[in-house]
Image (cartoon, rainbow, N blue to C red):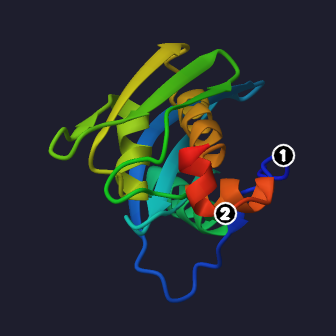
Amino acid sequence: MFQKYKSAELVKPGGLDLKDRLVGVQRVTKVTKGGRAFGFSAIVVVGDEAGVVGQGLGKSKDVASAIAKAVEDAKKNLVRIPLKGKTLPHEQKGKYGGARVNIIPAAEGTGVIAGGAVRTVLEAVGVHDVLSKSQGSSNPHNVVKATFDALLQLRDAKTIAKDRGISLEQVFNA
């Protein structure tokens, strides 16, 4: 999932204090000749609230095992997100399917101005001051993936200086 992001740093779940947050549970129906077969699909975000976050999807015949499967899947997809204190290094837009997400760093004390799935992801990352706008599709699966798209495009000043082959001071004073 994260192959197209060159700055995405995959993280192993060992030794991390991960907290899981449920984004949504959907009841799905499969119609067979014997009637309707009900199942559940759960999307979960796990994070250590210090820059490491992952998302996962689980499906099962009952809610509890769907959530458990989603948590296991999320732990396999952990990535490190660069933070600047309690906010983001810069503004970024992300998209996935019909969902569009815009995340903007905010001043100290602003809080997380975000709704639904975007809020869940940003809180799991450990961002405390951010503004966001979600446009287009409100499907939680696509909104979570659009938020991840925006977060994975974030780069801190050190990474930018290294990529450009210049010093950290030149990044700010050029």
Q: Secondary structure at mark 1?
A: loop
Mark 2 and 1 residues: CB-CB less than 8 Å, in contact? no
Confirm whether residue 155 shows in the render: no
- The x and y percentages for residue 48 are 41, 69
Q: Nearer the viewer, residue 171 or 69?
A: 171
Task: Give the amino acid type for the residue marked by disc 2 in the picture.
Answer: Ser
Q: x, y percentage for residue 168? A: 60, 61
> Which image quadrant is residue 92 in?
top right
Q: Give the residue at the far right of this rendering.
A: 3
Horizontal relation, residue 77 to residue 4: left or right: left
Question: Which residue bears the numbered disc 2?
Answer: 167
Q: Amino acid at mark 1?
A: Lys
Left or right placement of residue 76 versus residue 150 in this view: right
Residue 16 versus residue 174 in the image, above or below = below
| Disc number lying in front (2 or 1) | 2
Q: Position of residue 103 (x, y in %)?
A: 45, 31
Instruction: Say above or below: 45 vs 90.
Output: below
Would residue 104 be visible to someone looking at this image?
yes
Above or below for 149 versus 160: above
Residue that numbered label 1 is attached to? 4
Residue at 40%, 79% in the rendered image:
17
